[in-house]
Structures are given as structure tokens and as C-alpha cells.
Amino acid sequence: MAKSQKKYRRKQKKTFPIVPVAAGLFLIGFAVLALASPKADVNAGTQNSVVPMAVEFEAPELALQTLEGKTEALADYRGQVVLVNNWATWCPPCKAEMPTLVAYHNKHAAKGFTVIAIEAGDPAEEVRQFAERYGMTFPVWLDPGGEALKAFRNGTLPNSYVIDRTGTIRLAWTGEISMEMLEKYVTPLIAEGN
């Protein structure tokens, strides 16, 4: 009996360190995830941004209502470089990239650039509050029927498309955009027409 008790005690001592090690690994994993979560940092590098895909096709015919109740169409912006951003108020990466889009727009608006932020279905008052909170001075369109998502054939949010001055879509993004990617890929398109 004494031998079996010794074996039991040895097994107990060997398995006991597993609990603190497992707890330590769990805490390390949690810390890594917390550090890797998206942040609303205008100066963020490429860590949260994908590289855009170069494309070349005509912008879709799309007309929606603005927050002010006016109907606008993509064709109304011919002659400007336009970044169409499909987003939603509840979408974490949409919230994370919005300060970057606002800062980029404010920097380049005088050069014939604008963002058109197309909100995917939330009530107008929620969208208005979001736009005010984030300082969105560019056009905000309401899309309760998902028309923009259908027109661009992309239901993943956020997604963005850059339309050049001739009405041709030149860049496509799905996911969060960083300032570094905007400066690298969109700024040269803005410079083309100046």
C-alpha cells in the first residue's frame, strides 16, 4: 500500500505544474491578442491594412440619398478622384479606419479628392451621430437596401474603391486602410490630374 501511495504522490507532483503553465500560456495569448487588436490610429503602418488590388473597370451607375436628403450619383463626381468607402456604424475595422480616411480627405480635398462614405443600412440618425463624432466632412450616403454592396459585388465591410477623374475604378480594397497605403497608392492618382 505504501508503494502505491508513493506512485500517486509522484504523479500528483508531476501534473501539478501543468495548471500554472497553462494559465501562463493563456495570459500570454490574451496579451498578444489584445496588442494585435485594431486601433483608431491615423499613423498606423501596414499592420492593419491590406495592399489594394489594381483594377481597371468603369464605376457603376449608383445614386443614393445623402444624410441631408439629397440624391447624389457617382457620375456627379466625374473629374475628381473619389474613394468610395462602404462601411457600417457597428463594424470595428470601419471605425478603426475612419479617422485615417477623415485625415487623408482633409489633407487632399483641395486637390480634387473626396471620400464618399456609403453606410450599409443603419438608421439615418445613428449615421448622423457617427459622422459628427468622427468629423466626417465628406459626403455620407445612406444605403438601406445594400445597393452599393451589390453594385461593387462585395458584401464584406469595409471595402473601398478608388475612382479616377475619368470614372474608372483603379484600386480596390477589402479591409482596413492605413495612411501609409493611401499615400502610397492614392496620392499618385490625385497627382495625375493636377
Image: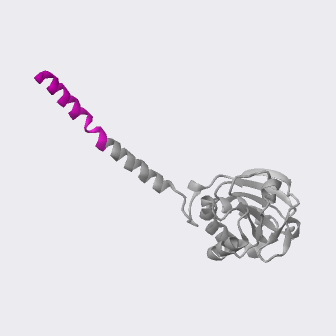
- On-image quarter of the N terminus: top left
Q: Which image quadrant for residue 17? A: top left
Residue at the spot 82% in from the left edge and 70% down from the top edge: 65
> At which x and y percent is residue 67?
76, 74
Magenta stretch encompasses residue 7: yes
Magenta stretch encompasses residue 3: yes
In this picture, residue 148 sits left or right of residue 102: right
> At which x and y percent is residue 180?
62, 61
Asked if 44 appears above or below 114 in the picture, the reply is: above
Q: Which residues are magenta?
A: 1-20
In this picture, residue 147 sits left or right of residue 99: right
- On-image quarter of the C terminus: bottom right
> At which x and y percent is residue 176?
63, 57
- The foreground one among 151 and 11 is 11
In this picture, residue 92 sits left or right of residue 167: left
**Residue at the far front in the pictured view:** 1
User: In this figure, what is the number of numbered marks?
Assistant: 0
Q: Main secondary structure of the magenta part?
A: helix
- The foreground one among 171 and 150 is 150
Residue at the spot 81% in from the left edge and 76% down from the top edge: 69
